[in-house]
Image: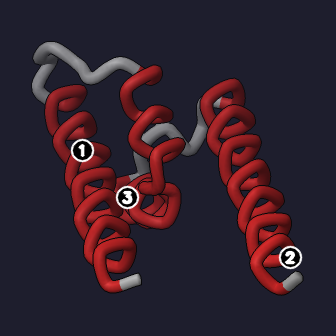
Amino acid sequence: MEVLFIYLIVINSLCFLTFGYDKWQAKNNKRRISEFNLLLLAGIGGTIGGLIGMNFFKHKTNKFSFILSFYAIAILQVVLLYFGIQMFKS
């Protein structure tokens, strides 16, 4: 359980920082991080960090397709977490 907690702190911090770095790259006309990689970070556990990063850096908040994909990942994670908890309860 402790390893999972550390993993979630690391992946969410990395996701938050990656959103900030991509925003900085965008403002400076530099090479960007792909949306796939941003969504991948969210998908492997960085959803909270990504959500905070999106709002803190005002990044990708107006791109509907990205928002839709991001929230689809978040909903899927909540559903999987719910069923995972139910499985361990039995």
Question: The residue under label 3 is which amino acid type?
Answer: Gly
Q: In screen coordinates, is 61 left or right of 8?
A: right
Q: CA distance from mark 3 to mark 1?
A: 8 Å
Query: Distance of mark 2 from mark 3, alpha carbons?
Result: 31 Å
Mark 1 element type: helix
| Residue tagged 2 | 86
N-term-proximal mark, 2 vs 1: 1
Label 1 crowd bin: few (<14), some (14–19), many (20+), radius 10 Å: some
Q: Amino acid at mark 1?
A: Thr
Q: Position of residue 8 (x, y in %)?
A: 36, 68
Residue under label 3: 53
Q: Is residue 30 above or below residue 38?
A: above
Q: Amino acid at mark 2?
A: Gln
* Secondary element at tag 3: helix
Q: Nearer the viewer, mark 2 or mark 1?
A: 2
Query: 2 above or below 61?
Result: below
User: Which residue is tagged 1?
Assistant: 18
- Whether residue 7 sits left or right of residue 47 in the image: it is left
Q: Label 1 near label 2: C-beta < 8 Å?
A: no
Quadrant in which the N terminus appears: bottom left
